[in-house]
Image: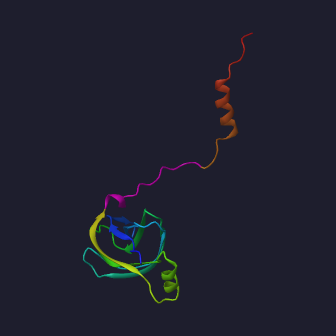
Amino acid sequence: MSSGPELSAGRGVQSGGQVVIPIAAANRTEAPMPLRRVDYTVSVDGGAPIAVTRSALATVHSLSTQTLELPVPAGPGAKTYSISGEVVYLPARKFWKVMYDEEIYRPSVSFSFSGEIDQAAAVIADPAPTSAEPPAPADAAKKDDAKVEEPVK
């Protein structure tokens, strides 16, 4: 049986009314590793824990890393997080896939991390207004006329 992904956490990012916690899943095997589900419990700034179950919707390709973005509701100004849970994955070998499909064996990797929340990323600047309309034909003609020189008579 191959081992599951190696997990590590990054800085949380405040985004509107939520914090997104990035969890990197590294696959050290030669076979792709589909991630099926993530169950996690998060506490922001030592508050009440929030339990979440969601589909992982990711495949960690051979010898690579895939980042899972795990959101949790949080008010503005959040500073720290504590997260724990497990990632359920689909094993590479056919025997274990059959065991998984028959719900006899569902391999998972547990994790537990604490970290800081990046407030600088929470500031979103308003984009500059842009015009979706093309320039008027008269304006375009004036610009073209300025570049054309008439022959001297």
- Foreground pick, 69 / 63: 63
Residue found 64% across the figure and 24% down from its top: 147
Residue 121 visible at all: yes
Residue found 42% across the figure and 69% down from its top: 68
- State the image quarter where residue 44 is shown: bottom left
Residue 121 lies within the magenta run: yes
Residue 5, horizontal then vertical, whole percent: 39, 71
Q: Name above or below for residue 129 compared with residue 99.
A: above
- Foreground pick, 99 / 77: 99
Residue 81 visible at all: no
- The quarter of the image holding the N terminus is bottom left
Residue 110, horizontal then vertical, whole percent: 34, 78
Task: Answer with left or right where residue 45 lies relative to residue 1.
Answer: left
Residue 85, horizontal then vertical, whole percent: 34, 79
- Foreground pick, 125 / 37: 37
Dominant secondary structure (helix, strand or loop) of the stretch shown in magenta: loop
Task: Answer with left or right where residue 31 lies relative to residue 85.
Answer: right
Q: Name above or below for residue 126 compared with residue 28.
A: above
Residue 97 lies within the magenta run: no
- The quarter of the image holding the C terminus is top right
Q: Residue furthest top?
A: 153
Residues rendered magenta in the picture: 119-131
Residue 9, horizontal then vertical, whole percent: 33, 67
Q: Residue furthest right?
A: 153
- The colour scheme of the drawn protein is rainbow
Number of marks drawn:
0
- State the image quarter where residue 17 is shown: bottom left
Q: Name above or below for residue 130 compared with residue 101.
A: above
Residue found 29% across the figure and 67% down from its top: 77
Q: Residue furthest left?
A: 46
